Image: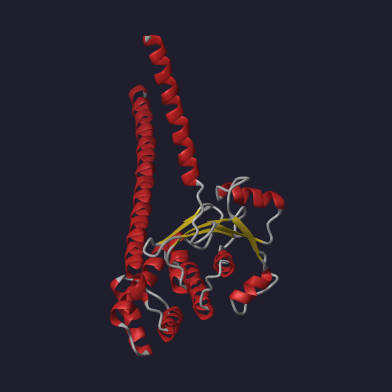
Amino acid sequence: MKKNLSIIMLFSLLFSIFTGSNVYASDHDSINEKFGLPIVVYGETLSADQKEKVQEKLDIHPGDQVEEFTATGEDLVNYIEGENRNARMFSSAKITRHEKGEGLTVDIVTPENITEVTNSMYANALLTAGVENATVEVASPVKVSGHSALVGIYKAYDVSGEKLDTVRMEVANEELNVATELAKEAGIDKEKVSELLTEIKKEIAEQNPATKEEVEKIVEEKLKSMNIELSPEDRQLLIDLFEKMRSLDINFDNVQQQLEDLTKDIQTTIKNLVNDEGFGQKVSDFFSGLLEAIANFFKAIKNLFS
């Protein structure tokens, strides 16, 4: 009797485990009826092998429920004025939209291949473009600047029926260009550039400047408070960029919390980078000390026998 009862309990346990797993899989694979499937947009220059590598990095497998599109040179000139329709496009993106209030998360899953743009640079530009509640993953199988990923993200919203404002997209692209320009030409750390842009946006949201002179004052104050030195030309780039944002009447109050969160993420990244550099210096100092100790040891041996 006890043996039969044990067998029954064993089967009950196994049944609960398997049915529980099935329920989990069903929940995990369920479709968001409001926003639809995640959208993946591949750069049109990708070869078949490169596309497979991108899919692997974006965690896309055969049978996964996603919508797939290709970002072309025509898309590039359609979404961003003045671009070259013959440009080579490797950057790809996966976009999963969320409910209002869930915020924007950007993850470059191939950081070794996106050479100019950081997570926070993408996030800043996308908030300017009007992308507020989504998870965005960016990948490339080869080293690229990363700028064309914006086109894929814009197209994802377009095909989903949630069109972004064209002029805001233009300004967002200009913002990304200014950010990478300051990082390259002015020699400012990429994360520091992102922090500067974020802080200026937060101040614009708070002060609601009515003139270009007021925008210029905000920019100058932030540069001073963050101890960032720029050439007159680079300062003007910033002023012109944020004057365009002011003219568009972009309400950064709507994303104030996301800007606050972005600032915290940037500062954490900077802190981690500094700590890493400190660790590297400690390692270097350790080996320098070790080599010096070895040299002193052999010098002492030589003196002992001389």
Up-down: is 214 above or below 57? below
Q: Tell me how the rendering is colored.
A: secondary structure
Q: Residue at x 47, y 65 (%)?
A: 122
For the N terminus, which image quadrant?
A: top left
- Residue 200 makes an appearance in the image: no
**Front-lying residue, 124 or 23:** 23
Q: Nearer the viewer, residue 178 or 59?
A: 59
Residue 77, image quadrant: bottom right
* Above or below, 292 relative to 231: above
Left or right of 299: which side holds 26? right
Residue 229's spot in the image, x, y percent?
37, 74
**Where residue 206 sits: x, y (%)?**
29, 78
Q: Nearer the viewer, residue 65 or 23?
A: 23
Of residues 295 and 71, the one nearer the viewer is 71
Residue 281 can be seen in this image: yes
* Rendered view: 210 above or below 30: below
Where does the C terminus fall, quadrant-wise? top left
- The residue under the point 52% across, 81% down is 167
- List x then y, in percent, for residue 17: 44, 30
> How many marks are shown on the rendered structure?
0
- Quarter occupied by residue 240: bottom left
**Measured from the top left, where is residue 46 in percent x and y?**
68, 57
Q: Is residue 253 above or below residue 28?
A: below
